[in-house]
Image: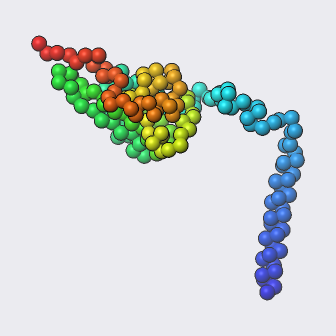
Amino acid sequence: MISWVRNVASAVTTTASALAVSLRWWLATYDPQRGTFTQQYEYPELPLRVSPRYRGFHRYDLTSCIACERCARDCPVGCIYITKHRPPGWKGFQVTSFIIDYTKCMFCGICTESCPMDCIFMGSSYNLSCYSRDGCVVDFARLPLEIAWGNGSLNPTAVACSKLLTGPVHPGPGGTEPATSG
């Protein structure tokens, strides 16, 4: 019984000393003029400024991708899925889908370092809020080129509209028409 009382007293004094430290730091740093985060940055209306080295959602250039699948092989979590086919009369492959599953991606940037054509980069967009996990699976081959390259905003509406397309929006580095052998 005495050891139980000692343990309770020790727990109470430890908790009280921790709360005293927290209270002392709160009082030392309290500033009533500071305001909340949303008052200071006006987040929903004005986007946050991000650092130039910020690693956000990817930017992907379908027009220069040669479908080597090096980014998918080097991804440590395996969140990049590429399907390709060789059109008749073409020298290389055509990317039919370039999917990144952002529910798995840890934004390490290894996929961007291994790309021989420099067609994938880490972007600066940070908001892909959606109500289902399906909205976090982005097929960059079906997004409009300005959104995939980062000039437009990668948003859930664009991702949902891209899921309605049946094929890629651009044939790839081979051009607009397959080369005919003649």
Q: Considering depth in this image, is 174 or 52 the residue closer to the camera?
A: 174
In the rendered view, does 43 fall on the left or right side of 19? left
The figure's colour scheme reads rainbow
Above-or-below relation of 147 to 105: above
Q: From the top left corner, tell me how far across and down residue 96 is, in percent.
A: 30, 31
In the rendered view, does 47 fall on the left or right side of 122? right
Q: Residue at x 20, y 22 (%)?
A: 90
Q: Residue at x 43, y 35 (%)?
A: 138
Quarter placement of the N terminus: bottom right
Give the residue furthest to the left: 182
Whether residue 62 is visible? yes
Q: Residue 179 is drawn in which quadrant?
A: top left
Quarter placement of the C terminus: top left
Count of numbered circles on the image = 0
Above-or-below relation of 61 to 4: above
Whether residue 116 is visible? no
Give the residue furthest to the bottom: 1
Q: Considering depth in this image, is 20 or 138 the residue closer to the camera?
A: 138
Q: Residue at x 87, y 51 (%)?
A: 24
Q: From the top left corner, tell me how far across and down residue 154 is, in percent.
A: 51, 29
In the rendered view, does 93 fall on the left or right side of 120? left
Q: From the top left corner, tell me how far across and down residue 157 is, in percent.
A: 50, 31
Q: From the top left corner, tell me how far across and down residue 121 is, in percent.
A: 46, 28
Q: Residue at x 81, y 36 (%)?
A: 35
